[in-house]
Image (spheres, coloured by chain):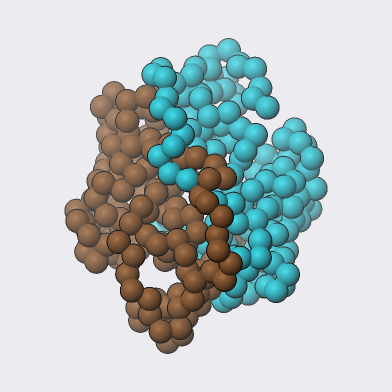
Chain colours: A cyan, B brown
Amino acid sequence: MPRPPRPGEKPFSASLPGFEDAGLIFIGRLRSPFATRDDCPKNRRAALEAGAAGRLEVDRPFREALVGLLPGDHVFCLSWLDGAARDLALQKPRHAETARGTFSLRSPVRPNPIGLHLVRIEALDIEAGLVSIDAIDVVDGTPLLDIKPYHGSVDRPQEG
Amino acid sequence: MPRPPRPGEKPFSASLPGFEDAGLIFIGRLRSPFATRDDCPKNRRAALEAGAAGRLEVDRPFREALVGLLPGDHVFCLSWLDGAARDLALQKPRHAETARGTFSLRSPVRPNPIGLHLVRIEALDIEAGLVSIDAIDVVDGTPLLDIKPYHGSVDRPQEG
């Protein structure tokens, strides 16, 4: 459910076309201890501090695609933040002084509300489609779009 | 255009539902020096080595959402890899010995072909919707879905 706008927030200036440029398929769900957005930790670090372990439930047709992943691996999960509004160009985080552009924030409110979550795999049962993960910061039942292995050689800035 | 299957590759075992669980909107395009998939570097590291700088072209309605980003910032770009097949559960990278599960690979072939690209912003012209980036590994004209600021505190594994 979209929240009411905060002072300084601003919707996109043109009316947006329909959300029909491409179609997504949900491959499963993210399970977490959090029933509502207000319950969720702010990010991965807060989820780790809160001990907010979670689980991926991968739907049957997609389970074999987990082969090759192992406990201890870090992966990026992409989620569909289906409760989020999509219409804000500028938005004001709860504790921020001023509104900022949506693409400079990690807020779930964005034209395509895709969540990006780094997690560590704790255990896998490929046949059952269950992947235990160390920490998660989304609402229980959030649709899962993709799982990608993390590679330090391409996924973090070069030092120095 | 999907490539022909390689030995050991395998499609998803069930017929997939339509790709209609959610809809995406393209917010712009990624510009690169690469006309075809075969021309593209394998990943960010190879793109940096090849000097494959690129550019984001953000469509007018979404430009104000760039406010707050600065040259030198690292961001994740999400792209829609629209030339990629979506039907493989197991696939065999060109130089691999055996086929592996799609979710253990960074191949563009996946149920939702969303590309994840870490880039550094070199220059921005928000009014024109142009963002110069240090390196990119996708075909010129690839649709852009999202831009997210990189935060080392949540986007990389903790050391030790």
Instruction: Answer above or below: position of B19 versus A83.
Output: below
Closer to us: A152 or A54: A54
Closer to us: B160 or B138: B138
Tell me where residue A66 appears, x and y as whole percent. 59, 70
Instruction: Answer above or below: position of A57 versus B29.
Output: below
- Split into 4 quadrants, where in the image is the N terminus of chain B? bottom left
Tell me where residue A144 appears, x and y as whole percent. 61, 52
Tell me where residue B96 appears, x and y as whole percent. 40, 82
Tell me where residue A55 appears, x and y as whole percent. 73, 58
Kindly give the residue lying farthest to the bottom in the view shown: B97
- Residue A155 placement: quadrant: bottom left
Residue at 39% across / 48% down in the picture?
B79
Name the side, left or right, on which A103 lies relative to B124.
Answer: right
Residue at 29% across / 23% down in the picture?
B127
Instruction: Answer above or below: position of B135 versus A88.
Output: below
Name the side, left or right, on which A67 lies relative to A57.
Answer: left
